[in-house]
Image (tube, helix red, strand yellow):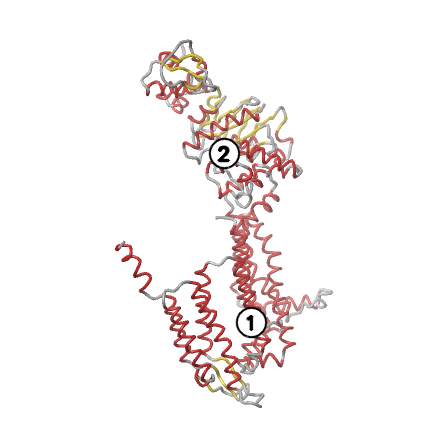
Amino acid sequence: MIAIEALTKVYDSVAAVDDVSMVVKAGSLTVIVGASGSGKSTLMRMVNRLVEPTSGRVLIDGEDTTNLPAHELRRRIGYAIQNHGLFPHRTVAQNIATVPTLLGWDRRRIEARVEELLQLFQLDPATFAGRHPYELSGGQQQRVGVARALAAEPRLLLMDEPFGALDPLIRAKAQDDLKTIQRQVSTTIIFVTHDMEEAIRLGDHIAVMDGGKLLQYAPPAEILVHPASPFVAALIGVNDRPFRLLSLETVAHEVEPGEAEGEPIAADADLRNVLAELLWSRREAAPVAERDGRIVGRVTLARLIARAGMPT
Amino acid sequence: MAASLARTAPVVSRGLDKLGVVVAALLAIGAASPFAVFRANRIVAGEAKFFFDALPAPDAALFALVAAAAGGVALLKTPARARLAAAIVFSIAVAGLIGVAANHLTPPGEPYARVAPAAGFWLLAFAGSILFTDSVVRLKLGPVTRLLALALGVAAFALALRSGVWSELSILKEYATRADVFWREAGAHLVLAVGSLAAAMAVGLPLGVAIARKTGWRAPVLNTLNAIQTIPSIAMFGMLIGPLGWISVHVPGAAALGVHGIGAAPAMLALFLYSLLPMAANTVVGIDQAPSDVVDAADGMGMTRRQRLFSVELPLAAPVILTAVRIVLVQNIGMATIAALIGGGGFGVFVFAGLGQTAPDLILLGALPTVFLAFAAAIVLDAAVEHVTGARP
């Protein structure tokens, strides 16, 4: 659990972060979203003390972050950034081994960990371990950047627009992978982005910032349904609200008994995609199938439309 | 088909190589200029010997053919390998023939007669080296290959020296009478150039790191070093005589270490001071060049400033810093010649002695090894820079 208490950062008498308090639950993925200059990155960088707060404090599992020297604190916290920041003069394996090496792990343990991470991120160790960053594609570089951040098994991972430089297709894949990997490693993640779509797609909780202030901190559904201010409403885009609401849930929750024609839909597809599929194929309903191909029922257009509206 | 022929054919068959025109012109002027100078003894005025006087007829004819062939290869758009081969054959021919000319021109039983290379020889040698360097660049040889080529060249040169082809040349006669002094001064020259480089690295690198961090200090420090660079070397020696003389007298042990107002100490100090600017400035530039997200990642992962410096910033700055080492070493090898003015030793001893005696051969004995050393240092360090940069885009 990370407790941020009355955190403030003042630069030249302007508050970049202004009295922000919030609690991030252990194992959750919390997205801080805001425009550039909103203070979102500064807030995140105060957690690992890349920026020292003017006032306020951060507690990780009850312990004040100022109890440790800053560099020792940072070795316990994963850190991944936009443009990955990989060391260009080091190989992929050496890059991933950075923090374990700083922590003085023995060589065998480091090698095993590097191999494990490369496999987790679908990079064949035999092919990629010895390569240099410039020999990788943008998506691969970004995966190595996240693998490096996770190398020393941190309980907290900070990510500052890690997917910002990726093109849309690879970006969507990276977001899915991050969700999958978080389930496997059960790390708490604080994720900074300016993209509300990304925030809704990834976040268990979303913190909306503007002008250094925390405007709203709530689960995505709550933010969509009850935006705390006109600014938050503008940020989520009122016109997209029904579709964003649908995107939060998988079809498994809306399955009803019965039969339907045509291609079955996967049970883990999100409702927005299902709606698009039904509209496109001009169907009133579609069968829903589990991963093993077993039909578990059907989903209807009427049900989706009912689900997309404002809760009453 | 016809269109593609029309497009490619002119490139292959027509047009002259631009640099080749220069090379061929140099060859022509060189061949028309005196090839060697004959003097009855080392200080009287010389008598210019043209090509066909300087060489036995068959050698002259053979060389005319080689030169014409090399000129042809240079002039036309020929493959780089052919150009390299032409450059090598031609250079060997020029180098060998100046020895032949010396033997041919020296009358038997006249130990004081001198034969020295003249303008024609130098122009021909220059043409050969342009063709050689150009073809090496075109072949895009890797750093290791270039080092091997340098080693081969040095070995061939040493063999030629031992074989005695050049032993009648004036410069080697000058060498023969002072061989032990020559090697002593060669050692002194290297100590001056490399020693001042080592000292400049020891001070300039940390200084560069310090002002890369403390940006407020950057302008004053670099401006001071810049001002030092503008002091002419003679003036610098003059300015150092006072303080070093004082130290020599008043600091215990300083005189025993060789610190005096004149001699090697001020020469070394001057070279060191001149070297500080390139070392410090390039270190700053190299560290500044490290991408900001890489530095941010290093901090974010918990590197201390020292770890960040040694495992991220300095390795990334290495090519730029090595470039400074190259600049400083080549510059110091040349400048160390001046040290002889104040008794600092080095190849300059022969240059200034030769100037004093109006003996051009003796000047060459100091100048040629200096040029060769600077050239070799440049090749070695260029290869090192390329090796360090090679692993990156």
Asked if residue B234 shows in the view, the reply is no
Name the amino acid, label 1. Answer: Phe
Pointer 1: what residue?
B157
Pointer 2: what residue?
A13
Q: How many labels does the image show?
A: 2
Task: Estimate the x, y position of residue A308 in percent, counting from the top left.
Answer: 38, 15
Relative vertical location of residue B131 with respect to residue A61 in this rendering, above or below: below
Give the structural element (helix, strand or loop) at label 2.
Answer: loop
Relative vertical location of residue A253 with respect to residue B227 in this rendering, above or below: above
How packed mark 1 is, by other alpha carbons closer than 10 Å (few <14, some 14-19, many 20 or more), is some
Q: State which mark lies toward you, 1 or 2.
A: 1
Name the amino acid, label 2. Answer: Ser
Gap in angstroms between the C-alphas marked 1 and 2: 71 Å
Residue B117 marker: none
Residue at image point 32% right, 64% down: B13
Q: Which chain is mark 2 on?
A: A
Q: Which chain is mark 1 on?
A: B
The residue lying toward the viewer, choosing from A16 and B341, is B341
Q: In which quarter of the image is residue A167?
A: top left
How packed mark 2 is, by other alpha carbons closer than 10 Å (few <14, some 14-19, many 20 or more), is few
